[in-house]
Amino acid sequence: MTQRLLAGPPLEAGAESYAAHRSRLGALPVAAGRGGTIQAIAEAGLLGRGGASFPVARKWSTVAERPRGRAVVLANGAEGEPLGAKDRVLIRSRPHLVIDGALLAADAVGADRIVLYIGEEHVAAHAAVTRALAERAAQDRSAVAPPIQVVSAPATYVAGEESAAVHYVNAGDARPTSVPPRPFERGVDGRPTLVQNVESLAHAALIARFGPGWYLQAGRAETGGTMLITIAGAPGSGVVEVELGTTISEIAERAGVPYAAGSPVLLGGYFGTWVAGDAAWNTPLDPVALRRVGASIGAGIVAFLDPRDCGVRMTARTLDYAAGQSAAQCGPCVFGLRAMADAAARIADLRSHQDDLIRISGWSRLIVGRGACHHPDGAAGLLHSAMRVFDRDFAAHQHHRQCLAPDAGGRAA
C-alpha cells in the first residue's frame, strides 16, 4: 500500500523528518477553494476514525457553513482508550502528515487557530510534534498558516470526548458538557470548532494530494480506503494499517492467533462489542457491514481473548474501569456504572447475590441515553455483548458459583 498512512520509513526509525516527508509525498497542494477540498473528501467517502465513523466531509461542511466568526480546528489525539495505540503511533511516526491534515482542515473550514490535543502520557508523540513544528518554522518560513498550539490532554478516557476536549482547552476541565450547543456551534473561545481525530486528518492530507480515486483503490467491502488498527492480546500485537474489508480471521492470522471454534474477539476496545463464531470472524472490518451485525470497529481495536482467561472476569474489570473513568457529573455514571461494576465483580468472584445477573442486565438498559455524554452508553453496550457471547459463563458464575475458564480448573465457591 504505497503512499498510505504508514508508508515510508520503518516505524522503529522514529518520526519522519519534514524534508523526508516532502520528498516522499510532495508539498500539501494549495486548496482549490473550501468547497473543492470538502468535495474531494466527500467523493472519497472518508469516515471519521475517532470511533463514530461519521462522514468527515459532512462534519467539515457543518463548520464551514457557520455564519459567525472564524473557526477553530482541534486535532484530537487524546486516545485515552486503554487498548488503543494507533493515534499515538501515527503522531510519533508521521507528525507532518497529521499537521498537513490540520492545516488542510483549517483552510477548508475557515479556521485561524489550530489546537493539537495529545494525551499527556504520550511522551514520544508530544516530542515528535514539537520537533515537527520547529522543523517547519525553520525550513518553511514563507508559509502562511494559522498558529498551532499543542495542548496536553489529561490521562482519562472521557478527556477525548469532543465536548470534554473543548471544555479543557477553554477552562482546564476535561469533562463533557451538556449539549446543545455542540462544538461546531460554539466551541473553543465560543467559536465554531471542528473536532477531528488525527487519523482522519492524516487521511484527508493524502486525499488532497492523490485524489479520491486513489483513496478508493484500497478497500474490499462497501467502504473504501485503509484504516489503522491496534491488535491486542496476540503474539503479534501492535499497530498496523489494513484495507477496510479485511476480516477478523485475516487479522488473527497476521497476528499469530490460532483460530478456535467460537473464539471471542473484542472490537472497538473497552467500550466496544464482543463478537464470536465463524460468522463473526469472517465479517469484514467495514463500518457498514459491522453495523448490520450490531458491532463497530470503534477506536480501531481488535482484541483477542486469551483462551485461559474468563470473559466474565474481563467484563468485570472493564466495567470497573468504566466506573472509575466517569466524569462524576450525572447519575447514570455516578450511580449506575458503579452499581453495575460492583455487581459484575461479585459475579466474577463467585460471590454474587441472588439477583445480580438480572440487575446488571436491567441497569445497563436504564442508563442508555441518559448521561451528559455517551460514556455510560458505551459501557452498557459492552456489557450487553458480553452477556450474549459469554452467556454460559455468566450463568455458571451466577447460578453454580463455578468458572468455566481453563485456568480456573472448574473452581467453585
Image (spheres, rainbow, N blue to C red):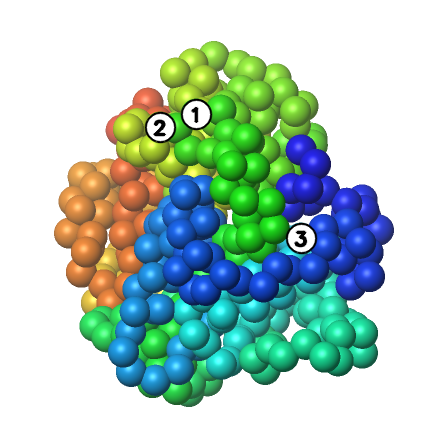
User: Where does label 3 land, which residue?
Assistant: 89
Give the image location of residue 114, x and y in percent.
Answer: 53, 76
Q: Please give left or right for residue 275 compared with residue 388 in the image.
A: right
- At label 2, the amino acid type is Ala
| Classed neighbour count for the residue bearing mark 1: other residues with Cα under 10 Å, few (<14), some (14–19), many (≥20) | some
Is residue 78 or residue 326 the one in the foreground? 78
> Up-down: is 73 above or below 346?
below
Q: State the CA–CA distance, disc 1 to disc 2.
A: 8 Å
| Classed neighbour count for the residue bearing mark 3: other residues with Cα under 10 Å, few (<14), some (14–19), many (≥20) | many
Give the image location of residue 126, x and y in percent.
Answer: 68, 69
User: Where does label 2 land, which residue?
Assistant: 289
Q: Quadrant of residue 331?
A: bottom left
SS state under label 3 = helix
**Between discs 1 and 2, the one toward the N terminus:** 1
Q: Quadrant of the N terminus?
A: top right
Residue 129 in view of the camera: yes
Q: Quadrant of the C terminus?
A: top left
What residue appears at the point 22 percent right and 71 percent down from the top-left corner?
179
- At label 1, the amino acid type is Ala
Is residue 10 or residue 379 the one in the foreground? 10
User: Where does label 1 land, which residue?
Assistant: 221
**Between discs 1 and 3, the one toward the N terminus:** 3
> Up-down: is 53 above or below 119?
above
Is residue 186 or residue 275 the one in the foreground? 186
Q: Please give left or right for residue 342 compared with residue 367 in the image.
A: right
Whether residues under marks 1 and 2 lie with C-beta atoms below 8 angstroms apart, the answer is yes
What residue appears at the point 17 percent right and 46 percent down from the top-left corner?
365
**Between discs 2 and 3, the one toward the N terminus:** 3
